[in-house]
């Protein structure tokens, strides 16, 4: 019996194999979604500082360039609340008061320099985790004929996961770029990528996303 236990593969990958490991792939038209790459996540003096986000931001320029070269729609999101009480943050800012820094005029609420939106790129302001919750994102994508969303941003365990779940439920193919999403600790980052890839979308690498956008076989 002991030998049987020793040879049994009890990994999460083995447990999910053949049950939660389907692939959906890209559809007809993609858009690139850049979720909440704000300076509060990349500055060490900020309580929101997340080393994984620093790496993800650094990996973004080639993917952004590919989207812009291929005329792929690029949509950015940020989080902003009304000062001084952040009432539009509801229960979330009570649960996570660190988010109260996301108000106009606070440097932590500015976009990271590497991913600053172009004047022609849409910016959706949200107050909660999902980029779909309480926003016009779904209607915008439908109007553009988009069926696939290439997701980048932060944090993996929060806004990325919530966006992937909602996107699937709205009928979009969710493609999460492993190299271009980040979190404050690798454990929730990896756990949520595993769960997203298993149930809600495809987790892909940056080069695969670039190759698709540029039409590279």
Image (tube, rainbow, N blue to C red):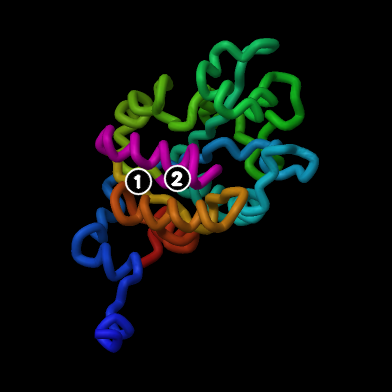
The answer to whether 107 appears left or right of 199 in the picture is right
Work out whether 8 lies above or below 63: below
> Label 1: how many residues lie within 10 Å, few (<14), some (14-19) or many (20+)?
many
Please name the residue that numbered disc 2 is placed on. Answer: 151
Quadrant showing the N terminus: bottom left
- Inter-mark Cα distance, 1 to 2: 7 Å
Q: From this viewpoint, is residue 61 visible? A: no
Residue 165, magenta (yes or no): yes
- Kindly identify which numbered label has been placed on residue 40: none
Residues 136 and 53: in front is 53
Range drawn in magenta: 150-171
Work out whether 78 lies above or below 165: above
Label 2: state its secondary structure: strand
Residue 80 location (% of width, % of height): 60, 22
The answer to whether 52 appears left or right of 213 in the picture is right
Please name the residue that numbered disc 1 is placed on. Answer: 174
Identified at 49% across, 45% down, the residue is 157
């Amino acid at each position: 019996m002991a030998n049987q236990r020793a040879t049994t593969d009890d990994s999460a990958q083995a447990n999910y194999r053949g049950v939660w490991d389907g692939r959906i792939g890209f559809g007809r038209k993609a858009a690139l979604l850049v979720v909440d790459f704000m300076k509060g996540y990349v500055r060490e003096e900020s309580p929101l500082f997340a080393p994984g986000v620093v790496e993800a931001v650094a990996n973004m320029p080639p993917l952004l360039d590919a989207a812009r070269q291929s005329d792929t729609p690029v949509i950015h999101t940020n989080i902003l609340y009304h000062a001084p009480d952040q009432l539009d943050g509801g229960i979330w800012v009570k649960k996570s008061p660190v988010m109260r820094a996301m108000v106009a005029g606070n440097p932590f609420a500015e976009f990271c320099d590497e991913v600053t939106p172009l004047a022609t790129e849409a910016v959706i302001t949200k107050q909660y985790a999902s980029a779909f919750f309480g926003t016009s994102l779904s209607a915008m994508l439908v109007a553009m004929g988009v069926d696939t969303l290439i997701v980048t941003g932060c944090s993996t365990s929060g806004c990325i996961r919530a966006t992937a779940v909602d996107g699937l439920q709205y009928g979009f193919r969710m493609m999460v770029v492993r190299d271009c999403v980040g979190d404050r600790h690798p454990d929730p980052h990896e756990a949520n990528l595993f769960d997203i890839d298993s149930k809600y979308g495809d987790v892909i690498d940056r080069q695969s996303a670039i190759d698709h956008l540029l039409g590279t076989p």
